[in-house]
Image (tube, rainbow, N blue to C red):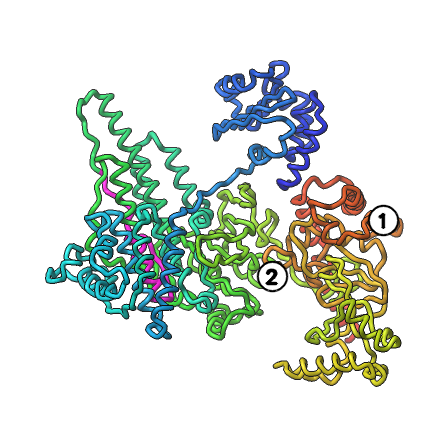
Amino acid sequence: MTTKEIEQNLLQLSQNINPEDFIFDFLLAFGFPKASVSRFKSGDYNQSKIKGEFLYKGKIFFKVGKTDQMLIESEILAKDERILKQKPRFILLTDFKSIVAKDLKTKASKDFPIAELPNFKDFFIPLTGAEIYKSTNDNKVDREASYALARFYDIIIQDNPDLYKGDSHSLNILLSRLLFCFFAEDTGIFEKEGLFTDAIGNNTDENGKDLDVFFKDLFAKLNSRKTDFPNSVKSFPYVNGGLFKDQIKIPKFSKKSRDILIDCGNLNWDEINPDIFGSMIQAVADPDERTSLGMHYTSVPNILKLIKPLFLDELYEEFENNRDQPKKLEKLLARLSAIKFFDPACGSGNFLIITYKELRLLEIKIIQQLIDLDIEEGERKRKIGKQAKIHFPRIVLSQFYGIEIKDFAHEMAILSLWLAEHQMNKVFEEQLEGFGQTKPILPLKESGQISLGNAATMNWEKACPKNANDEIYIIGNPPYLGARLQDEKQKSEMEFNFKGIASFNNLDYISIWLFKACKYLENYNIKSAFVSTNSICQGEQVSLFWPIILNKNVEIDFAYTSFKWSNNAKGNAGVSVVIIGLRNLSSSLKYIFSHNIKKRVNLISPYLTENSNLIIEPRKTPLSKFPEMTYGSMPNDGGSLLLNQQEKDEIIAMNSNSSCYIKKFIGAAEFMRGIDKYCLWINEDQFNEAVKNSIISDRINAVKDFRMKSKRSATNILANKSFAFGENRHKGKDSILIPQTGSDRREYLPIGLFDKDYVISNAARTLTEFEPYLFGILSSKMHIVWIKAVSGRMKDDVQYSVSLSYNTFPFPPISIKQKEIINQYVFAVLDERAKFPQKTMAWLYNPETMPKDLLKAHQELDQAIERIYRIQPFTSDAERLEYLFKMYDEMTKKDTLWAKEKKTKAKTKKK
C-alpha cells in the first residue's frame, strides 16, 4: 500500500470515527489483512486479557485514555513489562479528540488532534514493516567556499584572458593549492592559525599587483626543506606529497581577486568537509567538458543514501549488538581495518572521503565503548587508578581505492583523502580524551591507491586487487550519458565491453559500470552500489540490459527508487536518479527505499519494485485482444504546416475557399492545455489550387527549404512533397488520443476522444479501430499502474510507448455484456468532464484540483474493470502490479506456445 493510499485511508478514518472499531479501522488503514484484523477484534490475536486493552504482538498496544492524563499514562505503559513482553512497536491512546502515541523503538512521542491523523502517517509507517529513513543536511560553509572560489576563478579569467587559453590545468592546480592552504591554516596543519591569510594581508599590496610574486615564493617554500626564502614565507612548513612540486602559470591579480582571497580566509575552514574539492571542481570546470564526461558532484546526504544500506547500517548494527562484549568489539575493529572501498569513477574522491570519515566515526564509537568497559572492569576489581590503554587509528587510507580519468581530479582525490585523514585524526584525539593518539600529517605521504586511467576499459582488478578473503564494497556515481549523447570514444568503450550483446548501442553509458561491477563481484565477498540515471530501470533498457546482469548469479541488494538530484555544486545538475545495490545471490534481507520509506522485501525487480524478476519485452502486436495502436502524424516541417487561430483566420480571409485545406490539429500539449491548433492538410490533387493562396504558397516553400537543409537524405526526399506531412497516419476516422508524455503525479491517464476531422500529432498515440469500453480500460487504475512500472521516462514523466505500455498490457477476454457495463462507466466519466468546459485536461487530472465527482466516476470505472480481473477487490497498487505481472507471465507463455504450434503446423503443411 502506498503512503498516499494510507494518507487517504487515515483521512477517511479521522472524519468518520467509530469509537468501538477505531483501532481495527486504524490497522486496516495501514493495509493489515482483513482476516488478521477480524481475528484481533474477536480476541484471537489480542494478547491483553484486560477489558478495553488491545495488544497486537509486535505491532501496537491500544486503549482509550482519559483526557489530560494520556501523556503520563503512555510513559507508564511504555515501561510495563506485561506489555513489553509482546514487543509492540507503538503505544497508542486516544480520547477520540486527541491522540498520544509513542514509538518504543525510537522513543519518539507524538501528541496531536485526531483530525491531524493523516499528517502523522510517516510516524506510524513501521506498522507496515517499513521505516522512515533520514539523512543529514549539507554544510552551509561548504557552499559558501565553493561559490567564492568560483567567483575568484571568473575574475582571474577576466583579468588574464590570454594566460590559460586552451590550458586550465595550471589554474586548477592554483585553486587546489589555495584550498589546501586555507584548510591548513584553520585545522592545525600549519602551526599558526591564520598563517596563510595573514601572510597575504601583511606582505602584499592592497591592489594585488605583487600577489603573483608572493605565491611563487610560497609554493617554492612549501615544496622545500630549505630556509633561504623571503621572510614573507619563511615560517611556512615543508608539505611534500607532490602538491607543490610542479611549476605552474601564476596569473596577475587585482584588488578584487585579492579581496576574495582575504574573504575566503575569514571563512571557518575547520568546518568544511574535504569533499568541498569535488564541489569546487564542478563549480569551476568547463561546462562543455563537464557535460561530455557526465560529471555530477554528489552531496553528502546522497552519499549516505548509498553507503548506509550498502554497509554502514550493518556495521553499526554489529556494534550495537556487541556493545558489552570487548572481544567482539575488537573483532569488529579488525574487520573495519581490513575492508576495501573502491570507487571506479572517483572524480575528486568525495564518495571515498565521506566513506572514510563515516568509518572513522564508527571506529571512535567502538573505541570509546572499549575504554568505558575497560574502566568499568578496573573499578569492579577495585584497581584504583587503573589506566585504559592508548588506542591508535586502525582505519588507514590504503584501504581506499579509486580510478579517475582526469589527472587533476586524480591528484585532488589523493589530496582530499589526506585532508580527511587530518580532520578525522583531530576528532579522534578530541573524542577519546587522552586515550587516543595519532601521527602528524606533515610531511604528506604518497597514498598510491587512486589509479589514473579509464575505468570503462581498465581492468578493475589492477586498480583494486581482490583475494578470496577480502571484504570489498564498490561505490560511486559514474558518468551517465544516454545512448544518443555518447561521443565516438564512449561508443567504442560500449562496444569494448558489450561486444556480441545485441542492441548495446541503446544502453546508457553507466551500464558499463554496472556490468563490470557484476563481473568483479561474482563469487567474492563483494557488494556494489552506484548512483544511476533512472532510465536504466525503465522502458526498453530493462529488457536489453538486466537479463545480462541477472544471469550472472547476481541480484539487487537494495534500491532507491527515482528521486530528484540535489547537491552543493554551482549549476546543480538537476537530474532524476536511482541508487542500485548489487550482490551475489543471498538469503539476506533486501530493502527498497522510496520517498523516505524503507521497506523490507523478498525480491527487487529490475523495475525496482517488489515483484518477480520478470522482464517485460517490447512487442510489435498487442498481447491482449486489443486493436493496433499507432503513432500520430509527424509534420517534419519546421513549423510551417501548423497554424494558430490567427494564422488560420488570415489564410481564410485571403480566400474563403482555402478553408478546405485546413484541419484541426492536436497533440499532447494541445490536448492537455486546451490549445486550439490547426494544420494545412493538402492532397496532391489539391496542390495547384491551394498554392494560389500566397500565404499557403509561402508556407509550402518554407517547408521545402527546411527539408532540403536537413542532413538526413530521407528528409531531403520529402521536400518533393512539401505540401504534405512527413509521416501521414491520419485515417479520417474517430480516434482515441493518448499523450506521449504524462506526469507521474497523475492517478489516471488522461485520454481524449476526437472525431475524424482531427489530425493527431506524433506527440501522441492513437487508436482508430475501437469501442468505448477500450477507453475505459486505458483510463483505468490498472493500466496506469502498469505503464508507470514498465514504461520509459523523461526525468520523472512517464513516456507512453506502443510496444511497451500498450502492446504488453495484460487484460483478460471480455464478454459483450461486460463491454456494455464498462461503456456505461465510460460515458459517466465523459459526462463529468463535460461539466467543466472551461477547464483544461491538465486541471481536471491534476490530483490537487481533480473534481470529486470526476474522481468518483473514475473509481467506479476502476471497480468495474477490476472485477473483470478478479472478484476480490485490490487493496493497493502494489497488489495490482503483482497480479498484472503474474498475468503477463501466463499470457506470454500461452502466446509463445501458440506461436510455436502455428509454426509447426505451417511446416507440416508445407511438407
> Residue 388 in the image: x percent, y percent?
21, 31
Q: Quadrant of residue 602?
A: top right
Q: Amino acid at mark 1?
A: Asp
| Residue 425, visible in the rendered structure | yes
Total residue callouts: 2
Q: Residue 727: x percent and y percent?
A: 74, 74
Give residue 831's mark.
1
Label 2, secondary structure: give it: helix
| Relative horizontal placement of residue 346, taking residue 673 as reference (left or right) | left
Residue 579 image position (x, y, % from top left): 50, 52
What residue sits 64% from the left and 37% below the top?
6
Residue 52 in picture, x, y percent from top left? 63, 16
Residue 263 lies within the magenta run: no
The magenta-colored residue range is 391-419
- Front residue of 763/453: it is 763
Asked if one can make out residue 783 in the rendered structure from this viewpoint, the answer is no
Badge 1 marks a residue whose secondary structure is: helix
Q: Amino acid at mark 2?
A: Ser
Q: Earlier in the sequence, mark 2 or mark 1?
A: 2
458 on left or right of 174: right
Viewport quadrant of the N terminus: top right
Q: Is residue 129 left or right of residue 205?
A: right
